[in-house]
Amino acid sequence: MSQFDTQYDRRPTASLKWDALHDLFNVSPEEDVIPMWVADMDFPLAPVIVEAWQERMQHPIFGYSRVPDSLYDAMIHWQQRYGWTIEKEHIQFHQGVVPALALVIEELTNEGDNIVISTPAYYPFKDVPTKLKRHVIECPLTNADGYFAYDFDALESELQHAAAYIFCHPHNPGGTVWDQATVETIVALCKKHNVLLISDEIHADLLFSPFEHVPVMSLTEKEDRVVALIAPTKTFNLAGVQIAMSVTANDALRKTLKDAGARMAQFGPHVFAMTAAEAAYTKGEPWLNELMAYLQTNIDYVKEQLEQIDGVRVWKPQASYLIWMDVRDCALDDATLMKRFKEAGVIIYPGTKFGETGAGFFRMNIASPFAVIEEAVKRMKTAFNA
């Protein structure tokens, strides 16, 4: 039996995934539903993280903390697996990738600026700049045999009038891992048009073989206007711990961001976030390897089962645990399917959550014990065939 087979009741833990169902989806706490919407895992932490916390708790004092050199070293060493060597002074800590994104947009662009995103896109890419009074330009990705691809002519056309481009790398919601040629082209286009490149690489560690992650900053020069956002939280199911890093080699960008952090009294992560991140980066690889094998089984099962339904195609992710399900050839429209899924006891995101180009798709989180996935698939089949 795998450590990932155990089912836990998360409802007593103030879990967003489970306890917000009533507010967000009008589902009562008594209803038997399987939430597969927000991107966190129903799996326990790597034991090495829990052990690191327990060891830290042996000391009874939890006063002001500073980021230890050992955490910088662990993070730098982890990223070297992708051929990316980071200098310590290029790193700034944040409470999450989305807060980091907000700081970057706030400090490195101006109100009224155009911010380009490639849709469908992780919805904070639109929400955050919009709330900061920037103008979001949606440049649709193309569908290429079950994965996304870029129309670079269309992208360049939008970048000519943009202040920043937000790059989802690997892609959420589609699970596409961008190859080196794609990354090189994006870097070149942003540089050509003096566009700030913001690369969200939070899903980069959740790679399925044989796909490889190419960090944006491994292909850039020090003076390039590039900021990468990374975190252990998606990889090791630590979203509630809230820790992320922005990385930039550009001196002017880094000074602006660090000055802003100091001005807002953002002095780094809390002690348990630091402890967790260091344990994950130094001792978490065996757990991650077992996780990826388990996720692969879940993905293969979901694809095999749901593609038995006429008109359904499941995009097999190259990274992460989010499945992009294509229902454009089904006889049912999105609203009808969403209603049926909910009635059958499964809560997933409609593709339109990620932009209008997501119409005809659904995003499903399969990071749950296999028995839960089996039940969810059974319920979804009922919904399709009702």
Image (cartoon, grey):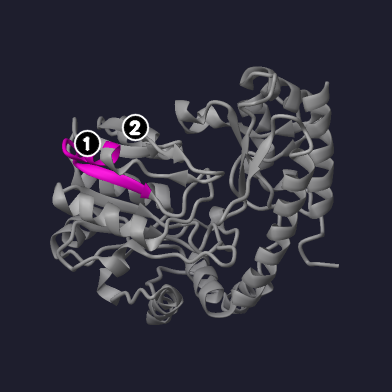
Q: Which residue is mark 1?
A: 157
Q: Is residue 181 above or below residue 284?
A: above
Q: Position of residue 48 (x, y in %)?
A: 64, 76
Which of 345/260 is in front? 345
* Amino acid marked by disc 2: Glu
Q: Secondary structure at mark 2?
A: strand
| Mark in the foreground, 2 or 1 | 1
Q: Which residue is mark 2?
A: 138
Q: Position of residue 206 (x, y in %)?
A: 56, 61
Region in magenta? 154-167
How far, Cα to Cα, is label 2 from label 1? 12 Å
Mark 2 vs 1: CB contact within 8 A:
no
In this view of the protein, can residue 351 be seen by the observer? yes
Point out the tag, 2 or 1, that comes first from the N-terminus. 2
Q: Residue at x 26, y 69 (%)?
A: 90
Q: Quadrant of residue 244?
A: bottom left
Q: Quadrant of residue 363?
A: top right
Query: Position of 276 compared to 21: left or right?
Result: left
Which of 175/69 is in front? 175
Label 1 environment density (alpha carbons within 10 Å; few <14, some 14–19, many ≥20): few
Residue 97 forms part of the magenta stretch: no
